[in-house]
Image (spheres, rainbow, N blue to C red):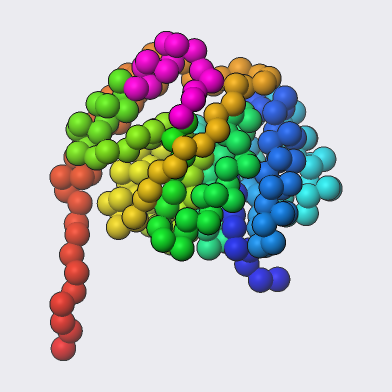
Amino acid sequence: MPDPKVSVIIPAYNEEECIEDCVDEVCEVLSRLGDTYEVIVVDDGSTDSTFEHLRTLKARHPQLRAIRFERNCGETAGWDAGFKHARGEFVVTVDADLQNDPADIPRMLALMNEWDGVGGVRAVRNDSLLRRISSRIANWVRNKLTHENVQDVGCSLRVVRAEYVKRVKLFKGMHRFMPTLLALEGCRITEIPVNHRPRPRGQSKYGVWNRLFRGLHDLFAVRWMISRHIDYKIKQEL
């Protein structure tokens, strides 16, 4: 069986209330594109019935692949496992909480003739005021310290050529810096406005303060990686 054109990766932790609608929406959008695709859901050690829902979904969506961790390992581990299992030329990342809108994926894929990656910018965010303010501050600090101009580093909805995501070495918490890590590998990225929806069911797994302090700690690690990054081009060989 030939490899699919598109691989969609969805990390999920205790998302029994959202996962079925999320996978249904993604499959509905991609089925209209005409390209072959797969949907990889990485169950990050859920303690609810998330994986049982995935068994049900597999019966009606043969394109679905499900990976289940032995224990909860964090969102970065979910992305990493998805990247390693992806077989498509293009990798799409989507959150399981239904705040990302799969209807934006075709517009992003359409730009892949010109770019190596396309990131989403949540023009109108459906989050609390405190979360919006903290996200803007964190985004500003990241850009200042990494010397970049990423408009919305916190948006998980992205499309990237698989060759780049497979080069990135991820550590715990580093999913927050994907645009920077991809750029270090030579990935040319653009951003476009995308729809951002309120979470319809379930609860967020992240608070403002745990994101803030962990993010600052990881930011200094990324700064070190940037300063030590090896970048060379071979001119000649004999």
**Quarter the N terminus occupies:** bottom right
Instruction: Please determine whether, in this image, residue 16 is positioned above or below residue 237.
Output: above
Which sits in the foreground, 158 or 122?
A: 122
- Which residue is at a point 63% across and 30% down the rendered structure image? 98
Q: Residue furthest bottom?
A: 238
Compare residues 218 and 31 and report the one nearer the observer: 31
Number of dots carrying numbers: 0
The picture places residue 28, in percent across and down from the top left corner, at 73, 46
Question: Residue at coordinates 16% horizontally, 88% vertically from top-left?
Answer: 238
Where is residue 142? Give x, y as percent: 27, 31
Residue 108 in view (yes/no): yes
Q: Is residue 47 magenta?
A: no
Q: Residue at x 41, y 38 (%)?
A: 175
| Residue span colored magenta | 123-136
Q: Is 229 above or below relative to 232?
A: above
- On the picture, is 147 further left or further right than 94? left
Along the horizontal axis of the image, is 122 left or right of 86? left
Give 75 or 122, whichever is nearer the viewer. Answer: 122
- Does residue 104 appear to the left or right of 150 in the view shown? right
Above or below: residue 187 compared with residue 18: below
Residue 202 in the image, given as x and y percentages of width and height: 66, 19
Occupied quadrant, residue 171 = top left
Residue drawn where x is 34% and y is 56% of the image: 187
Q: Looking at the picture, how far across and down is residue 167, in whole percent?
A: 38, 57
Q: Is residue 166 visible?
A: no
